Amino acid sequence: MCNLPIKVVCRANAEYMSPSGKVPFIHVGNQVVSELGPIVQFVKAKGHSLSDGLDEVQKAEMKAYMELVNNMLLTAELYLQWCDEATVGEITHARYGSPYPWPLNHILAYQKQWEVKRKMKAIGWGNKTLDQVLEDVDQCCQALSQRLGTQPYFFNKQPTELDALVFGHLYTILTTQLTNDELSEKVKNYSNLLAFCRRIEQHYFEDRGKGSSSIRSS
Amino acid sequence: MAAPLELSCWGGGWGLPSVHSESLVVMAYAKFSGAPLKVSVVDNTWRGSRGDVPILTTEDNIVSQPAKILNFLRKQKYNADYELSAKQGADTLAYIALLEEKLLPAVLHTFWVESDNYFTVTKPWFASRIPFPLSLILPGRMSKGALNRIILTRGEPPLYHLREVEAQIYRDAKECLNLLSNRLGTSQFFFGDSPSTLDAYVFGFLAPLYKVRFPKVQLQEHLKQLSNLCRFCDDILNSYFRLSVGGISPAGQEMVDANLQKLTQLVNKESNLIEKMDDNLRQSPQLPPRKLPTLKLTPAEEESNSLQRLSP
């Protein structure tokens, strides 16, 4: 959205290369910056920012909505991936452990699952059932949908960090194959969110996809 | 709707109806929406549970956790968000998430993890309200729970050391307070003239931070500089919680007022009697004015002087 030239690389040890243990991270010259918040600040320091045109109240709203997305959607995704037994058994273990040989794949997967479950318990999601989690996701999507309304982006004409964050989460939810599709069904209930995702995908990814080789050389 | 709703929660102090954020959120929401709640304060008898406080008990339901309690009250037609638009409802959810992510870790830290505060204020207060021997265990467990929550949600690398985590969470909390202050501006409540769920949540999180006297007060200092947030808390305390400040029930407060009135009346009567008696004594013929030769004043002026001395 900032028109910055990037090259996307998939690596198995990405989590270990990152300074904070989290993906995604960007590697620019001799600097490595990870996670959305710091990356946004880094890019802003270099002179590109999407939220300059917002006033103080709007910036506060944007931060609040970003926290809502982080709080609800991210936690729900983690829950579904790691605390729902069906999904864990069939998909997550296999996917998480796939780059490693036996027995490392099992050990690392169980360790990650134990960590995630601990975190869920600490924030009070430990006792939630899948239905309650889905209800929370529904509430969150409803809030996002109401905020978006009929506008093209959350803050009218220009996309901001919030749009990028929401797109990232919703796109992943919509396109990832899981044992049960209830999560993506919840999102599909809101047509303006679907239209939003499609619009961003078409505008920023498919058009770029055609010209990606030219961007790399620049 | 006529079923009695009983809320058990932690008690009050320092001018607040409750010192516990979540209990305060529920109480504030109940006041805003007009729900008739009977508040029973957790005390150091063995009656009642204190694990998941606040807890709402009705005839056939037990509801814990503020979000669920608020949902339950809304279903019972006690809705403080009736006049909000859809977008404002969405904003409410977003701001509550902001509070929980950015402000709550720092509030938890100030109350439960910061050793000065914990050992001098929080632990004695809570321990006095929990029966022995639980009072030895439960505050420690609550403190560990708070620390856990902070570390697990915030203490991810590269913030390995607790000091750095602390610095980060206080930075986030100050930013959150600034954002809230910007959003509130000069209006009385967050959405127009009547309070809503968001006001209840903000009040619940801010009021303990604002009022409880701590030794280590950096976040409190920052909050006190944001005068509109302080005014917001004071307004709500004065308008909705005036009668039950300090834990005295409204009936008790009226009795105190009545007693005070009676006392004042008695004192007034007494002073009137004393005045009359003195007048009578002065005017009686048993006291010849000539017995006081030093007084050069005329008898009329003597009378007026003595009367003036008696009046309050």
Image: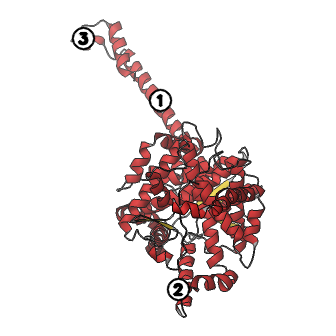
Say which quarter of the image contains residue B71. Answer: bottom right
Viewed as shown, does residue B271 lie left or right of A173?
Answer: left
Which circle's residue, 1 or 3, is located before the other in the chain? 1
Say which quarter of the image contains residue A138. Answer: bottom right
Q: Distance between the residues labelled 1 and 3?
A: 31 Å
x and y, in percent, of residue B11 in the image: 53, 58
Residue indicated by mark 3: B295
Residue indicated by mark 2: A108
x and y, in percent, of residue B253 in the image: 56, 45
Q: Can residue B224 be seen in this view?
A: yes
Please give the count of numbered marks on the rendered protein: 3
Mark 2 belongs to chain: A
Q: Residue at x 60, y 59 (%)?
A: A165
Residue indicated by mark 1: B268
Q: Is residue A84 above or below residue B87?
A: below
| Image depth: mark 2 or mark 1 in front | 2
The amino acid at mark 2 is Leu
Quarter of the C terminus of chain B within the rendering: top left
| Image depth: mark 1 or mark 3 in front | 1
Quarter of the N terminus of chain B within the rendering: bottom right
Crowding near pointer 2: few (<14 within 10 Å), some, many (20+)? some
The amino acid at mark 1 is Asn
Crowding near pointer 3: few (<14 within 10 Å), some, many (20+)? few
A192 vs B294, nearest the viewer? A192
